[in-house]
Image (spheres, coloured by chain):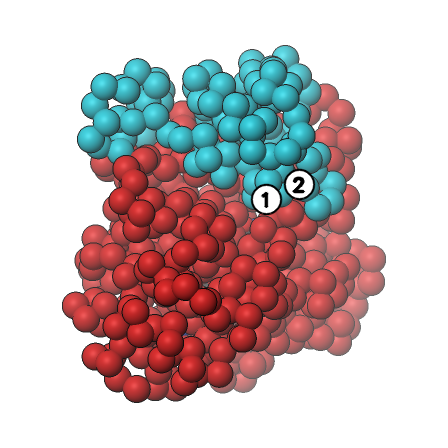
Chain colours: A red, B cyan
Amino acid sequence: MTATKLSRRAFTGTLLATTALSACAVQTAPAKAHVVVIGGGFGGATAAKFLRLEDPGIAVTMIEPKDAFVTCPFSNYVIAGFKRIDEITHSYAALTSVHGVRHVRDMAAAIDPAAKTVRTAGGQTFKYDKLVVSPGIDIRWGALEGYTEAAAERLPHAWAGGPQTLLLRRQLEAMPDGGVVALSLPGNPFRCPPGPYERISVIAHYLKANKPRSKILALDAKDAFSKQGLFQDGWNALYPGMIEWVPLGKDGRVVRVLADEMTLVSEFGERHRANVINVVPPQFAGRIARDAGLAATEGGMAGWCPVDPFTFESTRAKDIHVIGDASIAGAMPKSGFAANSQGKFVAKAIAAALNGRPTFAPVFANTCYSLLAPEYGISVADIFRATPQGIVAVQGAGGVSPRTPQDAAQHRLLEARYAYGWYSSTTREVWGA
Amino acid sequence: MRKLVVIAAFAAAFVAGAAAAQTPAAAPIPGSVLAATCSGCHGTGGRSVAEIPSIYGKTETQIATAMLEFKNDRRPATVMNRHAKGFSDAEIAELSRYIAANWR
Ligand SMILES: Cc1cc2nc3c(=O)[nH]c(=O)nc-3n(C[C@H](O)[C@H](O)[C@H](O)COP(=O)(O)OP(=O)(O)OC[C@H]3O[C@@H](n4cnc5c(N)ncnc54)[C@H](O)[C@@H]3O)c2cc1C
C-alpha cells in the first residue's frame, strides 16, 4: 500500500479492510477528517481520546508499538516496593473499543510533512489532515561517556516504565545492608524535574525499613532542583544521615560511567563506587520527532521541538502538533500532567480547526506530586498561559507546598492522598473508558 | 519555582480584550478549555476516581463560591488555593457556568 493511493475518503474503506484493525473502530459514515497520533503515552493517548470525544466524525489513528502502557508516574513506588507494576500498567482496550480510536501496533518510522503522510516500520502509510506527535523522550546514549545501552542493563536508568523499573527494584532487593546506592542526575531540561528526588526519597524509605545501615549518594549536574527545600526538610526529618546530595558546585557532575567497575567518575576525577547505580541520563525528544526535522538543531534546546505557544503546532511543519516531553513548552515541566493538559487542548483546537470554528487561546495546568514516604506528599502546581514569547506560569498563582504549614503532618498526609487520587483520575482520563 | 515572565496585567487583558477577536490571545477562553484544567485531578466530567473530591453535579454558585474562596485564601486548601489564583474572576464565572451546565 502506498501513500498516494490513500485519499482521506478511501481511508475507512481501503485501509481498514486491508489492515487487521479493531472491528469496533470501523465507521459506517465516511470520516470528515483523519488525525494521526504518534505515541500512546500521556500526551498521545489523551489527544486521541479527546479528539474522539470532541467530534466522533473525526477518524483517529494512534500509532503506538506497545499493547499496554507502563507509566513513569508511580514507577518510583514500584522501585521502593509499595506499588506493583500491574497497578501502573494501562491497556489500550478502552481507547479502541469505547472511543473508537484505531490503535496501530507499530513504530512510526518517517513523517512526510509535504505529502502529509506517516510511514510505519511495518510498511503501512497513513495520510493525515492533522498529525499529533507525542513520542516522549529518548536517552542520549553516549552523551554521558560510558553510559551505553549495554551499561544500562547493569546500571539501570529506570526513566521509562517497564523492565528497567523492575531491574532497579531487583538490584535494591539484592543489595546488602550497609551498601551504597548512587545516582547520577542530569542537567536541565529532562523528563520530570522532581522525579529523581522523589526516587531518592522512596528508596530511602525502603532502605530505612529493610537495610538501615545503607547510604544514598546523589551526584547532581545541577546546583538546585525542584521543590528542593521541601525535599531536604523531609530527608532530614524522615531519613537523617542517610542521603548525601552533591551539587554541581561541589563536584557533583558525573562525566564518565565505568560500568564494569560499578563506578561513577566526577568532573574533577573523584571516583564513586557503589553497590547499586541509577543513572538518570541526558535526554532529547523521541527519535521520530528529530528524524522528521521537528527538533531544534542548535542552542540550549537542541534536540527538543519548538512549537507555537498558542497551538502547539510545530514551528517547523504545518499541521503537525508536538506535545508532551518532546516539545519546548516554556515554563511547563516535562510531566504527565502537563502532557495530558496539552493533549486535551490540542484535541479541542484541532477539532475546532477541522470544523471551521474560531480558534481560542489555551490555558494549561500542572500539579506534580512527589511522595517522600507513602503518607508524606508535597506538590508543585501552576497555571500556564501562552504569550507570543512562549508559555509562562501565571504570576501570583501556583508554587510549591508550604514549607511550614499549620498542621504539617496532616498537610503532608493529605497531599499524599491527593497524589494517589491524581494518579487514579488522570490515568482513567488518559486510558480509561 | 521560577516564573519566567510577570503577567499579572496580561491575565487581566484576557477579560478586557473582547473587542479584538482575531488573535487567539485577545478572545476570552471558552469554558470547556478552562474546565479542562480541572479534570486531570477531579476526573473527566468532574467524576473523580479516588481520594480527590468529585466536582460534577454542583451548582454554578457552589463552584464559583469555592473557587473565589480558594483564590482569596478564605477556604482551607492544599493545592486549590494555588490553582484558583491563576484565573480571573470572570474566568471563574465562566468555568463555573460551564461545569454546572455540563458536568452533571
Ligand atoms: C520516575 C518518573 C516519575 C514521574 N512521575 C511523574 C508524576 O508523578 N507526575 C507527572 O505528571 N509526571 C511524572 N513523570 C513524567 C511523565 O512520565 C512524562 O512527562 C510523560 O510520560 C510525558 O508524556 P509523553 O506523551 O510526552 O511521553 P510518554 O508518556 O513517554 O509516551 C510516549 C509514547 O510514544 C511511543 N513512541 C515513541 N516513539 C514512537 C514512534 N516512533 N512511533 C510510535 N510510538 C512511539 C512510546 O512507546 C510511548 O508509549 C515521571 C517520569 C519519571 C521518569
Q: Could you tell me the amino acid type at mark 1? A: Thr
Q: Do residues under tags 2 and 1 come within 8 Å of each other at their CB atoms?
A: yes
Residue B78 visible in the shown view:
yes
Percent position of residue A300, x then y: 26, 54
Which dot marks residue A13? Answer: none
Q: Quadrant of the N terminus of chain A?
A: bottom left
Q: State the residue at coordinates (77%, 32%).
A: A409
The residue under label 1 is B44
Q: Helix, strand, or loop for circle 2?
A: loop
Expressed as whole percent of the image width and height from the top left, the position of residue B104 reads 64, 33
Q: Is residue A330 above or below residue B23?
A: below
Query: Which residue appears farthest toward the right when viewing the image?
Result: A209
Q: Residue furthest front?
A: A29
Q: Residues within 10 Å of mark 2 (few under 14, many from 20)?
A: many
Residue shown at 21% from the left, 23% from the top? B20
Tell me if B60 is positioned left or right of A292 in this view: right
Q: Report, in whole angstroms, how far the alpha carbon at label 2 lies from the one at label 1.
A: 6 Å
Residue A232 appears in the rendering: no
**On the rendered image, what quadrant is the C terminus of chain A found in?**
bottom right
Figure check: A260 above or below A209: below
Q: Nearer the viewer, residue A186 or B43?
A: B43
Callout 1: SS? helix
Q: How many marks?
A: 2
Kindly identify the residue that appears in the image at 68 percent across and 42 percent down: B48
Residue located beneath label 2 in the image? B47
Q: The residue marked by circle 2 belongs to what chain?
A: B
Near-viewer residue (A388 or A164)? A388
Residue A164 drawn above or below residue A195 = below
The amino acid beneath tag 2 is Arg
